[in-house]
Image: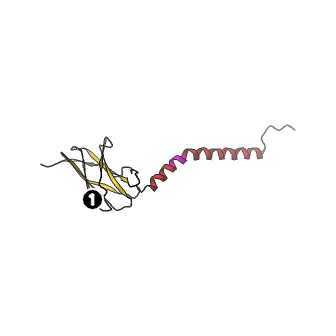
Amino acid sequence: MNKKALSPVVTTVLIIIIAIAAVLILWSVLKPSIKDTAGALESGCINLDLEVTSCTAGDTGNVNIIRNAGQGEVASLKIVINEGASVAPCTAAPAELATAVCSADVNADDTVEVTAVLTTGDTCPVTSGQTTCVAATP
């Protein structure tokens, strides 16, 4: 007897091997993304809520920031000017529901955002909305 087709057992084993290989390939692609996301969630940035309330340009530009309710140990702030064109450090570390005033070299019509540097050294992603700076009134 000369059989030319695969037996059902061999076919089933091949399908299982292909399925396992597909899962392993998918896992190797997704694992780094999952690990990075988990690290960001643990860093304390997820509940941190900072907001730029005003920005005044001038010889010494002032950026007013409020920290709304939310957990996170803030060590300092960074002022992101014009979507990352420059970044100004700010040593202020406002507690929950407190405000901070940071000096930054900003001009009228510059856009500013704020991000936090945690006590762990991690820098949170920018989550505040953009605020446009206005010229100081003489």
Q: Residue at x 80, y 37 (%)?
A: 4
* Model colouring: secondary structure
5 lies left or right of 89: right
* Snapshot quadrant of residue 15: top right
User: The disc labelled 1 sits on which kind of residue?
Assistant: Thr
Residue reaching furthest right?
1
Give the extent of the magenta segment: 30-34
Q: How many marks?
A: 1
Residue 81 is inside the magenta segment: no
Residue found 27% across the figure and 45% down from its top: 111
Q: Residue at x 58, y 47 (%)?
A: 27
Q: Residue furthest left?
A: 138
Q: Name the main secondary structure of what is drawn in magenta.
A: helix
Q: Is residue 31 magenta?
A: yes
According to the image, label 1 marks what residue? 99
Q: Nearer the viewer, residue 122 or 55?
A: 122
Depth check, front residue: 137 or 121? 121
Whether residue 36 sits left or right of residue 6 in the image: it is left
Residue for point 33% across, 56% down: 50
Q: Position of residue 105 (x, y in %)?
A: 24, 44
SS assignment at label 1: strand
Quadrant in which residue 66 is drawn: bottom left
How far across and down, in percent of the image, does residue 95 sit?
32, 61
- Quadrant occupied by the N terminus: top right
Q: Where does residue 76 sit, x and y in percent of width and height?
A: 33, 53
Task: Say above or below: 68 vs 62.
Answer: below
> From the viewer's perspective, is residue 5 above or below residue 96?
above
**Number of other residues with Cα within 10 Å of mark 1, as a class: few under 14, some 14 to 19, many 20 or more:** some
Q: Position of residue 65 (x, y in %)?
A: 28, 55
